[in-house]
Amino acid sequence: MQPSTAGVPDADKRLTERLRFAPDTGHIMLFDQRMLLMHGFSMAELRRELVERLGSDMARGVFTRLGYQQGLADHRRVRDAFGDDVATAVSLGPRLRDMEGYVRNTPLEVRFNQDAGEFFGDFTWTSSWEAEAHLQQFGISGSPACWMNVGYATAFATSAFGRPLLVREVECVAMGHARCRAVIRPVAEWPNAETDLHFMQVEDFVDPPMQRRAAEASAEGEVGFEAVSPLEHELVGASTAFNSVVYLLKRVGQTDATVLFLGESGVGKERFSRALHQIGPRAAGPFVSLNCAAIPHDLVEAELFGVDRGAFTGASVSRPGRFERAHGGTLFLDEIGSLPLHAQGKLLRALQEREVERVGGSQLRKVDVRIVAATNEDLRRAVAEGRFRADLFFRLNVFPIRIPPLRDRREDIPLMLGVFVERFGQRFGKRIRGITRNALDALWHYDWPGNVRELENMVERAVILADTDGALDVHHLFSGGEVTDWQSFSVLPSGDVVARGDGMAARAASGDAPDTAAGLLAGGRTLADIEEAVIRAALERHGGKLAPAARELGLGRGQMQYRVARMRRRTTSPG
């Protein structure tokens, strides 16, 4: 295993350069996000009140999840500013937490091998405000009390490493120890990890961010898997965008209101619909789905409302439709925007009257269903263009929930990656030990036009192609024709932009220039010309926005600003 650079001398300087304080306005900015200078005793009092009102377990969950969100956000900003290097993140993350005033981190031992999925970290925590507050307010505790720090370190390490890691506090001042001490390992290496992961679970219907479903299956130490809930592997995430959807889902879940899921294809609208059904009052009833885009237009009515015997040639028996089959439960209408106009009117009547009439029949049948619809279309535009009935749209648009695309919740990629690798490893009888640094970088920078469905398919293919006990690499994941600009360029420590990916930069550094570089040189382009062209192209691709353009080039926002300013000076300088 390779050691980390946890003692990087310039860590403090690199972080303090990102801290700004304006006493006149009261604004404290860290990595361009606003911070608050709070009274420690007030936070301690809030913590005490939550423990007394909610109980220790529920309060612990609240603070652990709060720390988890902070860890995700901080790593995203460290990544944007300093790049994707794991060793850099491991060195800067603990120091960043120190600066924020929560605890003082001292690494005793940190080593990792990303390709093999191996990680071990051993830290002492001193001056933990949580431990000190708990000790003062409740006396000696029977369990560790640094809840926020555990959540923060787990999220930061998992996001940086790209595989599920778990931090466990093995000593705590609140328990009477002389110091607090935390150990970081992959989730699967911890016994009874479910106990810790439970406190990171947002809601009962959401899998904990890194739910471990492993149980010892034999004396030989083989790992088996067992379902722990009917929603196993359905909803996994911890990003702010994901939690916003979960909040709305919880609010509407206990009602019978019609819900309209909006979002691009592949974001998981059906999975959210199933979760909505299972947390609602109709959970004991059936969940029936219909993809409106997959049914021929002349058969839509038969599918929705059923067919009576003799209604048309071939209808030798009567058959109930989806409405009748969903009686007492939920009817999920996917791709509702594809429904033909003639069926839209009959659907509207069924929704309003709560009764259906089979094709070829004359009997009205009462139905009691909850309607959940989904679309990747802009239904308001479809209404304006005359392709969708306005009255049906307003009937469906009672409680719209927009599910964000995967590119807007990239922090969840490591969590979903761990779930998918576990699932397909079990299905195909393979054990995958890790994911390479290049593969993780490629996943992070990919644009994800197919969203979560595409990630799931890529991981399934990668597990098939990878060797047992091997690591997933770029050529395993991106072997289906996906196009990613990740392999375009990188930045050397000198600040120069070079071609990257598949060893290209390494060959260039060793003097074995690739054909691409040779072609650029043959065209008489200087390094400054090439760098300027790359920066302009990145800015153009991202509408002039610095942050995404910098991320695509592997630069921090400050580095990008410096290069743009230098480029402008070069352009406007005389001569």
Image (cartoon, rainbow, N blue to C red):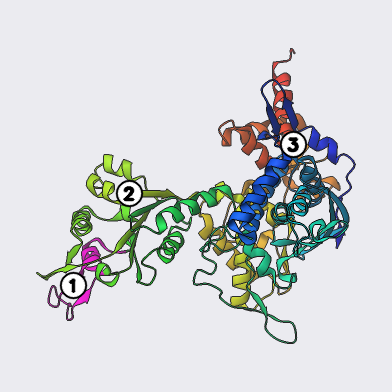
Which is in the foreground here, disc 2 or disc 1?
2
The local secondary structure at tag 3 comes to: helix
The local secondary structure at tag 1 comes to: strand
Magenta range is 295-321
Q: Amino acid at mark 3?
A: Ala
Q: Amino acid at mark 2?
A: Val
User: Which residue is located at x 26 percent, y 46 percent?
Assistant: 387
Which residue is denoted by mark 1 in the rendering? 307
Which is in the foreground here, disc 3 or disc 2?
2
The label number, if any, that marks residue 27 in the structure image: none
Q: Earlier in the sequence, mark 3 or mark 2?
A: 2
The local secondary structure at tag 2 comes to: loop
Dot 1, crowdedness within 10 Å: few (<14), some or many (≥20)?
many
Q: Earlier in the sequence, mark 1 or mark 3?
A: 1
The label number, if any, that marks residue 398 in the structure image: 2
Q: Is residue 316 magenta?
A: yes
Q: Quadrant of residue 294?
A: bottom left
| Image height of 357 relative to 267, above or below | below
Which residue is denoted by mark 3 in the rendering? 522
Dot 3, crowdedness within 10 Å: few (<14), some or many (≥20)?
few
Residue farthest to the top, as pictured:
574
Q: Give the quarter of the figure containing the N terminus.
A: bottom right
Q: Is residue 358 left or right of residue 18?
A: left
CA–CA distance between discs 2 and 1? 30 Å
| Image height of 418 relative to 36, above or below | below
| Place of residue 263 in the rendered image (x, y in percent of width and height, measured from the top left) | 44, 50
